[in-house]
Amino acid sequence: MANIIKLKSIENQDGILSVFEHLMPGHIERVYFIHGVPEYKIRGGHRHRNTWQGLVCLNGSCKVYVQENNQDEETFDLDGSEKCLLLKPTDWHQMYDFSSDCILLVMANQNYDPDDYIDEPYNDAKVI
């Protein structure tokens, strides 16, 4: 199941340095960010065959609904840059309730491959 990882951060008089290390299997191959999401818009709505992802809300906030293997489900509040939501490939997820200033950073251990996406939710997944 997806889980929140508290990022290692070093704070001193020059500010805070947060580190992304050893988050997921393999190497981070793809990094992108989502921003300017209109009110009430839902992003995601898929899971993957192979790709692990780490989500960090760099600014603002959003929620992520996750269901794994047609069983466990949980909603995560991403509301601080010290939190990283780690999604396994089997985690069907939807991002929603974006604040107007939200910047959501996504890191993946695979490059984009349309064949890696599974768009159908699990049978009893709550579709936002």
Image (cartoon, rainbow, N blue to C red):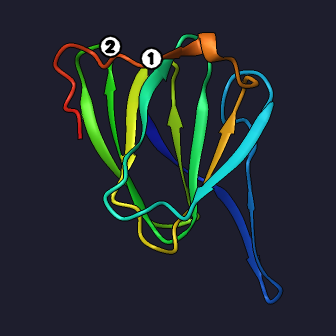
Residue 63: x, y in percent?
36, 53
In three-dimensional space, the C-alpha distance between marks 1 and 2, rounded to whole angstroms, equals 6 Å
Seen in the picture, residue 39 relative to 24 is either above or below; the reply is below
Residue 32: x, y in percent?
71, 46
Residue beneath label 1, please? 90
- Crowd tier of the residue under label 1, counting other residues whose Cα lies within 10 Å: few below 14, some 14–19, many 20 or above: many
Q: Name the quadrant containing residue 104.
A: bottom right
Seen in the picture, residue 128 relative to 46 is either above or below; the reply is below
Residue beneath label 2, please? 69
Q: Name the quadrant containing residue 27.
A: top right
Given residues 25 and 118, the one toward you in this image is 118
Q: Is residue 55 left or right of residue 27?
A: left
Residue 29: x, y in percent?
80, 30
Q: Is residue 93 left or right of residue 85?
A: left
> Which residue is found at the position 44% from the left and 66% from the top?
61
Furthest residue toward bottom: 13
Q: Is residue 118 left or right of residue 65?
A: right
Q: Secondary structure at mark 1?
A: loop
Q: Secondary structure at mark 2?
A: loop
Q: Is residue 66 left or right of residue 70?
A: right
Whether residue 78 is visible here, answered yes or no, is: no
Seen in the picture, residue 34 relative to 15 is either above or below; the reply is above
> Which residue is found at the position 56% from the left and 46% from the top?
55
Q: Are marks 1 and 2 in contact (CB under 8 Å)?
A: yes
Q: Quadrant of the N terminus?
A: top left
> Which residue is found at the position 51% from the left and 24% from the top?
88
> Which residue is found at the position 23% from the left and 41% from the top?
128
Whether residue 67 is visible here, answered yes or no, is: yes
Q: Please, what is the three-letter code of the amino acid marked with disc 2?
A: Asn
